[in-house]
């Protein structure tokens, strides 16, 4: 069966510090991978998606970047965090087929102070 | 860009009452997916509707896709405390890219 791991679960970082969130998927190959952000009490906003190694597409301009160094590894980064980067970050994957559901990781709650 | 509007934003019900959340779009939806997010948790896929007028049931949950494929609803009969959470509708777009555009969700609280 397929599993998705995301860490850390919670993170408190000072403004201006770097960020690295990691997500790995097991039990499948060549998945589509996604990073979403959920602000408090709001819906999910797609930040980045990847259909293959080294292929990253950004949905919204922001202070973050993403990388996919391996087939089942997806990393969300920032060189300098802003207060507005606080939120709940969710990694997700799907089969890369039309009309298939997304499977989400447990999420990382990031607080920038 | 595409938008999926979801109402209501919040719903408070007494245990045993019914609950409905609605999802609307100004454009024709290719499909609609429904997710549930428990407090402090991550979204979990519930169901997908693709066909015009489609109705699917999962125990006490009934999902409908409008005839014009511009709206959808999730109805819960006789809510229980385990139904607490936020329910999101989402449209998958971009073909095999599988990107999802989510509604803002309906947060359901159930008073025992």
Image (spheres, grey):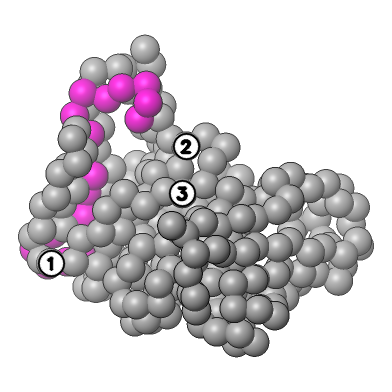
Residue B38's disc is 2
Judge whether residue A46 can be spotted in this image: no
Q: Are marks 2 and 3 on the same chain?
A: yes
Residue drawn at point x = 55 percent, y = 79 percent: A50
Distance Cα–Cα, label 1 vs label 3: 23 Å
The Cα–Cα distance between marks 1 and 2, rounded to whole angstroms, is: 28 Å
Q: Is residue A59 left or right of residue A68?
A: left
Marks 1 and 3, the one that precedes in the sequence: 3
Left/right placement of residue A74 relative to residue B8 reads right
Q: Can you give x and y, in whole percent of width and height, for residue A100 in the image?
A: 33, 68
Mark sitting earlier along the chain (2/3) = 2
In this view of the protein, can residue A49 be seen by the observer? Answer: yes
Label 3: which secondary element: strand
State which chain disc 1 sits on: B
Please check the rendered image and state whether residue B38 is part of the magenta-colored stretch, yes or no. no
Mark 3: few/some/many CA within 10 Å (<14, 14-19, 20+): many
For the magenta stretch, what is the residue range? B66-83
Q: Which residue is mark 1?
A: B51
């Amino acid at each position: 069966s397929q599993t998705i791991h995301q860490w850390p679960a919670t993170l408190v970082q000072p403004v201006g510090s770097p960020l690295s969130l990691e997500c790995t998927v097991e039990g499948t190959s060549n998945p589509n991978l996604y990073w979403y952000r959920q602000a408090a009490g709001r819906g999910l906003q797609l930040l980045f998606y990847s259909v293959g190694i080294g292929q990253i597409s950004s949905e919204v301009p922001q202070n973050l970047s993403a990388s996919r160094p391996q087939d089942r590894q997806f990393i969300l980064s920032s060189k300098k965090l802003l207060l507005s980067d606080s939120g709940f970050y969710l990694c997700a994957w799907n089969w890369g087929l039309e009309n298939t559901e997304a499977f989400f990781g447990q999420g990382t709650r990031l607080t920038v102070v | 860009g595409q938008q999926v509007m979801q109402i209501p934003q919040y719903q408070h019900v007494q245990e045993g009452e019914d609950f409905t959340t609605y999802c609307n779009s100004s454009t024709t939806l290719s499909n609609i997916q429904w997710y549930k997010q428990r407090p402090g948790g991550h979204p979990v896929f519930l169901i997908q509707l693709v066909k015009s007028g489609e109705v699917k049931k999962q125990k006490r949950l009934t999902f409908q896709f409008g005839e014009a494929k511009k709206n959808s609803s999730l109805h819960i009969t006789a809510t229980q405390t385990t139904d607490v959470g936020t329910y999101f509708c989402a449209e998958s777009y971009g073909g095999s890219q599988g990107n999802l555009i989510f509604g803002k969700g309906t947060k359901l609280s159930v008073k025992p």
